[in-house]
Amino acid sequence: MSEKNDLLEVTWSDRSASQTLPSLREEDEQIINRPNVKKLPSGRVVGIIKRNWRPYCGMLQVSDLSDAVRHMFIPSEKRIPKIRIETRQSDQLKDQRIVVSIDCWPRDSRYPLGHFVRSLGPIGDKETENQVLLLEHDVPNYPFPQSVLDCLPSLPWTIPQEEKAKRLDLTHLNICSVDPPGCTDIDDALHCIVLPNGNYQCGVHIADVTHFIRPGTSIDAEARRRSTTVYLVDQRIDMVPELLSSNLCSLRDDGPRYAFSVLWEIQPSDAQIVKTEFHKTIILSRASLTYAQAQMKIDDSTASDELTQGLRRLNGIAKILKTGRIRNGALSLASNEIRFNLDSETHDPIDVISKELMETNSMVEEFMLLANVTVAKKIYEVFPQCACLRRHPAPPVSNFDPLVKAAESKNIKIEVESGKQLADSLDKAVDRNNLFFNTMLRMLTTRCMMQALYFCSGLFPQSEFEHYGLAAPIYTHFTSPIRRYADILVHRLLAAAINADTTYPDLLDKHAYVLAVKKNALQVLIPRYGLEGTLYLNDFPFVFNELEPSQSAANVKLQLFDKLVVRISIETKNKQHQKMKFASWKNQTLYEILGVPKTASVKEIKVAYYKKCKECHPDKSQDDKSHDQFVKIQQAYDTLSKADSRRTYDLTLQNYTSTGNRYTRSTPSDAYQAYRTQQTYYYYNGPRTGMNYTESEFERFMRTRNGYWGSNTDPRTGPHSKEDFSSPLKVMIYLILGIGIFEAITVSWIYDRDINHLNEYNYRYSPLNRQALVDFKSKVNNGDILDLEQKLQERKDLENK
């Protein structure tokens, strides 16, 4: 590699030197004129756009000179040349694994120059060598950041009633999981029962990870960055935090869990699928079995419990499924898989054994493959342009040359024209004198295969969806969401396909403007797509005013040219005449503004608030949209972060409105019901409904500040009314008497700091202003109080005049 770089450096550095080299045309003529030379496309590197340097692991080659400070670093990656570094710690580092970074590569140097970064530990140490593996393969192994941990639910965790009402309860079924020994991140579980008509109901239940990992959150970004769980001999680097991977999402036998279930009605005679269903479920695993334990239950003729009988039924169906796959041309390839026996105390490997495959291994594999194929068909049917699928291209015939030649050495012919012919040839390739011969041929076949790839269904024709190794026309990954991020994407697509969850709101929610107001609908324009449509208001108690015209409900009034947010979908009831559908208008709740569920804890609300502030801060974008959105975020946090205000708001969502210490609801069935926590009462008041939002203390403070120190005209709200002059004074008195004199002092200090900025109306809210009420209490003297009182009196005199 270094010689090639030297050649490039000579070519670039000196034009006269490059003239001594043969020209490109002369080299081409020499190659063409050579006899018996296979002509291949060739090229030449003419420039390096960006160096792909990274920290490298390796060991130090100490110089032979006793007092030398310049030494050579030998990277573990053989393709990387030696790196020259300077260090005075050669005696301490000579037997260590170290990390070195490249600084530069001078044109006149054979080796690049770098510097020592850190030491990993002694050479040959287990922990040290594990670190080398992770760093060299760029595996993220750092602890999960606090922003990710804040997205986790708090313990003890229980399933709320709201989720129980949404999900199908399958806790009565005898469900079990079958996994390797020591597995704690259990993705899947199985069950099989006999239906009244004699058919079997077989179910695959996969951990519902997407319930805890919502799109756009910190934990979702971290899982996407890690992409997969990495397994070493004595440790596991999780894609998601351990609370999810080994507890709340793991389908253990210690309590109910969320699951995403695929249920089939299967004929027991030929394993034909009669019916398929997809459900978000709640399951209760009866046992967490290993492959050996499950095999012992199946083979034990004295066992007749329902769980064992279910395993036997599953095993019988799996054998039929496998026979059908092999008949279609599926390949049964082999690899030299081994397993380490670890010491129970030190976790050091003490023995290496080959993995023993049992019928239960094949049983679990067949049902996982069936689930993957079934889900792939469903998401492709609903989302033909954006389904996340997996394809395995058929390898070119030339890839099989090493396999064919190896088989010919034993006078065995391998047919490679199709997957079916290849599978049949491998089944017949047997050497009675070498029992391991067929396994070695299958291992060679594995090396001839192409790489399987994830793809978007809209990028390839359906004829190229095939998975060559499995002989499946369509395939995806659905069964391992704890350890693969691709499965999380598929779970979200399937949930949207069966209307169990919504997709990303940004894809469906678009801004619209009112073009016409009708008695029961609005005619709206969506500029993003140039569409006009009808938005029906039948599901909401709007009152139509024909004179204005307008539609009113509670504190919401819709008029011509008003701006709305509508949700666009496709009406699919009529397959032949599909049409676009606009969802009925709905006021966005404070929970939806922060992007948290109604059951979110205070910590989850706080995390969502800071994230939304970072995304929508008006300082990043000086437009009205970001400003208004930021105000809504502030209001949502002020209300939901306090127990009393959140309880009051939750009542308003149930159509209660507050009047003093009383709450009024529009349904007579809930009249005069006591709210026990604060001894307040509900009174029926006819058909009136709606939500009354109380202005937060922070919003009152900011409104007072802008109204008092600004001029009489605001470019955002227009000229101030008389109430605008009196309201700030009232709020200032409230701050002085209610909150305390230090808050009023802070207002004076903030005015002295920001007076010039406020006059230009470029002020933007910031969460730091809230903290300013506390940080500068001790920095204001008594003179500021007198000055503030004098300014207030002058303002009052001006108003009186």
Image (cartoon, grey):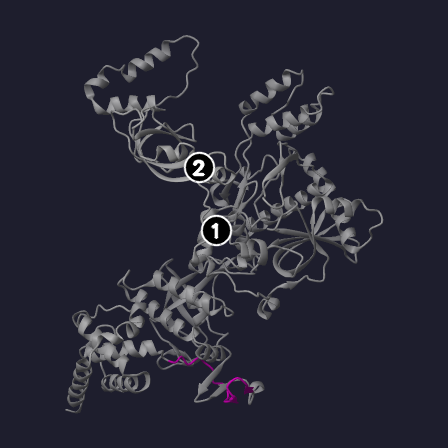
For this view, does 542 lie left or right of residue 768? Answer: right
From the image, give the main secondary structure of the stretch colored magenta.
loop
Q: Cβ–Cβ below 8 Å for labels 1 and 2?
A: no
Give the mark nearer the N terminus: 1 vs 2: 2
Which image quadrant for residue 719? bottom left
Q: Position of residue 309 (x, y in %)?
A: 79, 51
Which region shows up in magenta?
Answer: 674-694
Q: Is residue 591 left or right of residue 698?
A: right
Disc 2: which residue = 136
| Residue that numbered label 1 is attached to | 223
Residue 365 quadrant = top right
- Up/down of 232 relative to 308, above or below: above
Q: Give the residue drawn at x 40%, y 39%.
A: 119
Q: Position of residue 356 (x, y in %)?
A: 69, 37
The quadrant of the image that shows the C terminus is bottom left
Where does residue 575 sit, x and y in percent of width and height? 56, 55
Residue that lies at the very extreme toward the top in this rendered image: 35
